[in-house]
């Protein structure tokens, strides 16, 4: 199967480490324009991407900015309905699975960081809510409580988002659930853990990263990439540009590594892993 990771380049709405760009309150019009620019960048990448079986966006393509910089209620800046409809149409038109990272809100105005998967007909297969919230997300968003696997015509997928990958239990859960590939929209992909998650579970990992505002991806952070079950990198994107990263993979390749990793476990000795919250 072919997977396409839609790597975007952030605008100043995401200028988390740029004091000049972060100073002051944005007008509603400025915030909505910046938000719309990022949404349209994602759709442009998808609409012009080469054929693939699965397209994966980055995290929260409709991110509205930090609430302290926005006038009015934060939830008023989130309306995922039209975007979900558009992703659905594109999945149908391209006869492909589309995994869309979006902020969504419920009827009570609670906000969630989500990953919604559409099938080749445009039907909504599943929606995952980010379980491990990072930083200010813990203040602004509602966390998820369940991990989601989805069966496709090329294999079983596990759904995750950004900070989830910092915790080895997430991919281990997916490996034990029979997932062959874990996909992860993110703004903070790091090779130091992503390669380990693939290797220690014998599964494929694919992260769709964004390029930070005004700088390339630096340090231990890594561009969008596809990682094989032996921890090797099969495809990696640019550090300083938006692009579509296309990679062909066979989810049956190195299947024996997943069988080995799971078969030789000793669950009877792991009690503390699920009973203790802190050291």
Image (cartoon, grey):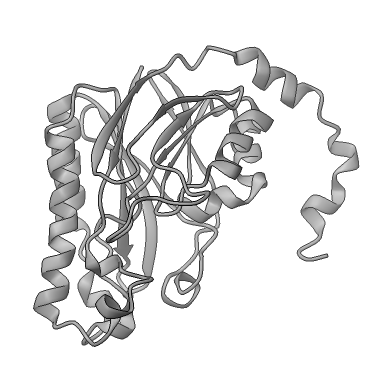
Is residue 4 left or right of 94 when viewed as pictured?
right
To which quarter of the image does residue 37 belong? bottom left
**Residue 145 percent coordinates (x, y):** 55, 57
Q: Is residue 271 above or below residue 124?
A: below
Q: Which quadrant, please, contains the N terminus?
A: top left
Decide if residue 56 is on the left or right side of residue 205.
left
Q: Position of residue 129 (x, y in %)?
A: 44, 55
The residue closer to the viewer here, 220 or 146, is: 220
User: Is 70 or 215 nearer to us in this picture?
Assistant: 215
Q: Is residue 226 above or below residue 138?
A: above
| Most distant residue in the right direction | 269
What is the x, y in percent for residue 96? 24, 26
Q: Is residue 100 left or right of residue 95?
A: right
Q: Kindly indicate the quadrant of the structure image that contains residue 141.
A: bottom left
> Which corner quadrant holds the C terminus?
bottom right
Q: Residue at x 35, y 52 (%)?
A: 59
- Measuring 44% from the left and 51% from the top, which residue is drawn there? 218
* Residue at 53%, 12% in the rendered image: 253
Q: Quadrant of residue 21?
A: bottom left
Most foreground residue, 265 or 215: 215
Percent from the top left, x then y, of residue 177?
A: 61, 32
């Amino acid at each position: 199967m072919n997977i396409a990771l839609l790597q975007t380049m952030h605008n100043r709405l995401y200028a988390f480490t740029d004091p000049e760009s972060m100073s002051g309150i944005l007008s509603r019009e400025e915030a909505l324009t910046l938000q719309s620019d990022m949404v349209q960048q994602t759709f442009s990448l998808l609409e012009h991407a080469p054929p693939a079986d699965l397209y994966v966006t980055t995290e929260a393509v409709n991110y509205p900015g930090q609430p302290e910089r926005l006038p009015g209620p934060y939830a008023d800046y989130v309306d995922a309905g039209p975007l979900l409809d558009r992703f659905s149409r594109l999945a149908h038109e391209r006869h492909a699975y589309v995994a869309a990272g979006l902020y969504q809100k419920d009827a009570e105005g609670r906000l969630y960081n989500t990953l919604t998967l559409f099938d080749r007909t445009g039907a909504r297969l599943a929606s995952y809510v980010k379980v491990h919230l990072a930083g200010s997300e813990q203040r602004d968003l509602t966390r998820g409580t369940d991990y989601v696997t989805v069966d496709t015509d090329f294999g079983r997928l596990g759904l995750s988002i950004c900070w989830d990958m910092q915790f080895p239990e997430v991919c281990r859960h997916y490996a034990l659930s029979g997932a062959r590939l874990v996909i992860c929209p993110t703004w903070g992909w790091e090779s130091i853990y992503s390669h380990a998650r693939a290797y220690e579970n014998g599964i494929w990992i694919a992260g769709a990263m964004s390029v930070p505002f005004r700088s390339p991806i630096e340090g231990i952070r890594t561009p969008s990439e596809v990682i094989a079950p032996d921890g090797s990198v099969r495809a990696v994107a640019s550090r300083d540009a938006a692009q579509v990263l296309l990679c062909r993979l066979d989810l049956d390749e190195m299947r024996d590594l997943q069988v080995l990793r799971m078969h030789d476990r000793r669950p009877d000795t792991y009690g503390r892993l699920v009973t203790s919250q802190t050291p």
